[in-house]
Amino acid sequence: MRYKIVIDSCGELLDEWKQDEKIESVPLTLMVGEESVIDDETFDQKSFLKKVAACPDSPKSACPSPERYLKAYKCDAERVYAVTLSAELSGSYNSAQLGKSLYLEEFGDKKIHVFNSCSASVGETLIAMKIQECEEAGLSFEEVVKNVEEYIKSQNTFFVLENLETLRKNGRLSSVKALVASALKIKPIMGSTEEGSICQLAQARGMNKALIKMVDLIAEKCGGNKVKNLAISHCNCPSRAQILKDAIEERIAPDRIIVLDTAGVSSMYANDGGVIVVV
């Protein structure tokens, strides 16, 4: 095996990756009250969302241990690339870096690079696709790293949430603001900063208007440039994701639009009805 991509479980996997030995998902652990849920192929989104709605406390996540990353790096691949969710949101990036140090100390030199996605969810998916594209094109390890780091800097993340409860519970949104937003049906359109933290870009009254506003912001950010790959992830709302996909195709016509259902960590943040777009 020439190369391997290790992606933490906040990144959704393409169907073809699930049986590909070159791709490995390293799971985070989700905590709802006193219960722990492993974010792997056993994750049950429907059951998880019910538990989150019933729990008065905010759900939390725990990043994989450095030893778990070390295990992923122990393989026949000559080159290993790890992709983690934003270092501003999780310790997964630091854990992956420590896992790399442990590997080098124990087994000696190997080409391993850890990418801080500065994003989450399908942002990580697109980064893994970019790594795969560069590797299949025959680029050197150094060239892959350079090209992918530049690609990460060019990425933009947008999302709209139907339910603000998780943001309220974890303190990112005050109870008063959440109550007013819910009463007035105000939906904030959120995004990521260059460093990978969360910011509010705009707001609209009602989900449909918020989606239209998000498409406007995406088109504005693309600025008429040709888009190769764009990804949408949704939490339990495939029809909403399809409407969004159709609207984006009409405005900017990307070469490929990938639509995926959120896995565990992304479901925790997006909550029921949330949609995420990365371009």
Image: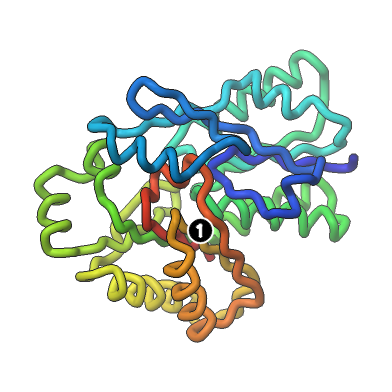
Q: Residues within 10 Å of mark 1 (few under 14, many from 20)?
A: many
* x and y percentages locating residue 79 in the rendered image: 82, 38
Single out the residue that lies furthest toward the bottom. 250
Q: Tell me the colour scheme of the image.
A: rainbow
Instruction: Determine the residue positioned at 28% across, 32% down.
Output: 55
> How many labels, in total?
1
Q: Is residue 122 above or below residue 55?
A: below
Quadrant of the image occupied by residue 137: bottom right
* x and y percentages locating residue 182 in the rendered image: 16, 57
> Is residue 204 toward the left or the right of residue 36 in the image?
left
User: Type of residue at label 1?
Assistant: Ser
Q: Is residue 231 above or below residue 113?
A: below
> Is residue 174 toward the left or the right of residue 190 in the image?
left
* x and y percentages locating residue 197 in the rendered image: 39, 46
* x and y percentages locating residue 277 in the rendered image: 48, 63
Which quadrant would the N terminus be assigned to in this image?
top right
Q: In this view, does 276 lie above or below 71?
A: below
Residue that numbered label 1 is attached to: 233
Q: Nearer the viewer, residue 76 or 53?
A: 53
Instruction: Determine the residue positioned at 50% across, 75% down.
Output: 222
> Is residue 241 toward the left or the right of residue 64 in the image?
left
Instruction: Determine the residue positioned at 41% across, 75% down.
Output: 215
Q: Is residue 50 above or below residue 223?
A: above
Q: What element carries label 1?
A: strand
Quadrant of the image occupied by residue 136: bottom right
Single out the residue that lies furthest toward the top. 106
Instruction: Determine the residue positioned at 61% across, 29% down.
Output: 96
Q: Which of 18 and 115 is in front in this view?
A: 18
